[in-house]
Image: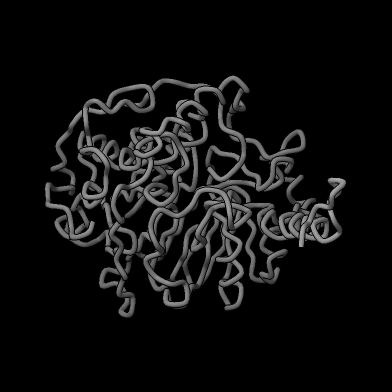
């Protein structure tokens, strides 16, 4: 049955399908704007000015002329191929039955998703189990490796923490699955509107402004500043906040950057809430076109030092293709910068659990990603982000030279930032 008649008019069947698709996009994946008392609280925030949430310092928007080099990089076949692994990414199914021996265990699930077991509390950061970070299932950045563990096998989750509402951090099907149990949700101001629209009861949502806290089972969760943006639609105003997060237990404390550009606020967070046993640092999806909202790996190491972090866990890489840099480059550059400052780095495979308080020799350190790349990691001919990447040793600061497992200085450039979207 054709959906277009001979005169070229769209039939009722096609029109109904379009309306259903538009309805699904508008009222489900796109979430909802704050209303009523939630909107009043948003407007009363000191971070909400001139009709939108603002960063501590202004950031620029992406200029129309910036799309030309971005399109050129996107269409380059060789560069596009290097943005994906050449071979399957090795994953691990973690054994989470017994509690951590040291009281702190972290399981990186890929991208910005991490399960943190801290002083008896199980906290799940930015959970994304979906196949694509997109409002639709047929388009948008597709997962580059399978989820290491089905969501139903992760065990009880006490708290879900969301850094902001972009699709690669706030995933509709994952939230709806988690809404079926008694999990609490800690989110920045305004993000609760999305969760309520998707079925999370209002009394299980803690919606926080920067430097506000809530307590769960004796552990304190605090929203802290970040430098980013928000939005799940092209026309959506900045009515939801973005945040990094501090989790402080009786014996341990951790920090999760979410998505952010480098900014002086990291030092203030470190002074006020640090030091940290672990910092989970965004190192991927950077570009010279949006330097204000995503850190380079070197900036990530600098942020870790500002935070007074202990072990550094690189996040926001390996799982989705979101920027024009080679797939493995973020972790290679992070290791080089961390080695220069004697910083211990954990580089687990997706799904691999580790305890930051264990001896440094027990941290996951094997460069497993080098078995997946299209060209040798650290190839001196690979020019990315406006400069060359040179070979470098990986050997100190808790990251040791080791065979890959089976299967698998701050840049001064400043310029326009990216529009809202998945990054």
Q: Is residue 211 visible?
A: no
Q: Which of the pair 165/324 is nearer the observer?
A: 324
Q: Is residue 20 above or below residue 257?
A: below
| In the rendered image, the vertical position of residue 173 relative to residue 304, given as above or below | below
**Residue 31 at x, y percent in the picture:** 70, 56
- Residue 41: horizontal and vertical position, in percent? 75, 51
Q: Give the residue at x 54% y 66%.
A: 215
Residue 225 sits in quarter: top right
Left or right: 256 with respect to 169? left
Q: Along the line of sight, which residue is nearer the eye, 172 or 120? A: 172
The foreground one among 297 and 19 is 19
Q: Is residue 196 left or right of residue 211?
A: right
The answer to whether any part of residue 96 appears in the image is: yes
Q: Residue 129 at x, y = what percent?
A: 49, 63
Residue 189's place in the image compared with 339, above or below, is below
- Residue 123, horizontal then vertical, whole percent: 46, 66
Residue in the image at 58% along x and 65% along y: 173
Image position of 349 (left or right of 264): left
Q: How many marks?
A: 0
Q: Nearer the viewer, residue 82 or 51?
A: 82
Q: Residue at x 42, y 37 (%)?
A: 267
Residue situated furthest front in the rendering: 6
Protein image colouring: one colour
Quarter containing the N terminus: bottom right
């Amino acid at each position: 049955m054709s959906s277009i008649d001979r005169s070229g008019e769209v039939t009722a069947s096609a029109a109904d399908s379009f309306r259903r698709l538009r309805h699904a996009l508008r009222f489900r994946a796109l979430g909802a704007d704050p209303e009523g008392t939630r909107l009043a609280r948003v407007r009363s925030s000191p971070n909400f000015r001139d009709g939108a949430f603002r960063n501590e310092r202004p950031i620029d928007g992406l200029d129309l002329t910036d799309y030309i080099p971005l399109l050129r990089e996107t269409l380059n076949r060789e560069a596009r191929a290097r943005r994906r692994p050449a071979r399957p990414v090795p994953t691990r199914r973690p054994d989470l039955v017994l509690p951590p021996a040291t009281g702190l265990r972290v399981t990186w699930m890929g991208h910005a998703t991490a399960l943190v077991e801290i002083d008896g509390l199980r906290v799940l950061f930015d959970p994304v189990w979906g196949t694509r970070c997109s409002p639709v299932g047929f388009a948008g950045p597709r997962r580059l490796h399978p989820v290491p563990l089905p969501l139903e096998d992760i065990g009880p989750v006490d708290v879900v923490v969301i850094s902001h509402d972009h699709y690669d951090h706030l995933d509709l099907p994952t939230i709806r699955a988690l809404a079926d149990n008694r999990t609490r949700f800690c989110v920045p101001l305004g993000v609760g509107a999305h969760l309520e629209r998707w079925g999370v009861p209002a009394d299980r949502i803690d919606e926080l402004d920067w430097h506000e806290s809530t307590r769960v089972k004796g552990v304190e969760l605090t929203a802290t500043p970040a430098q980013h943006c928000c939005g799940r639609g092209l026309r959506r105003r900045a009515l939801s906040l973005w945040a990094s997060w501090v989790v402080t237990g009786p014996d341990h404390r951790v920090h999760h950057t979410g998505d952010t550009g480098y900014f002086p606020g990291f030092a203030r967070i470190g002074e006020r809430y640090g030091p940290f046993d672990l910092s989970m640092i965004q190192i991927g999806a950077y570009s010279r076109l949006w330097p204000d909202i995503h850190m380079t790996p070197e900036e990530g190491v600098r942020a870790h030092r500002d935070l007074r972090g202990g072990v550094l866990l690189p996040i926001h890489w390996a799982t989705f293709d979101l920027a024009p840099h080679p797939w493995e480059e973020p972790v290679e550059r992070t290791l080089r910068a961390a080695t220069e400052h004697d910083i211990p780095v954990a580089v687990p495979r997706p799904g691999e659990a580790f305890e930051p308080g264990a001896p440094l020799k027990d941290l996951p350190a094997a460069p497993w990603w080098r078995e997946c790349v299209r060209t040798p990691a650290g190839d001196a001919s690979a020019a990315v982000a406006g400069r060359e990447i040179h070979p470098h040793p990986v050997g100190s600061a808790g990251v040791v030279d080791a065979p890959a497992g089976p299967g698998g200085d701050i840049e001064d450039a400043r310029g326009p930032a990216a529009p809202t979207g998945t990054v």
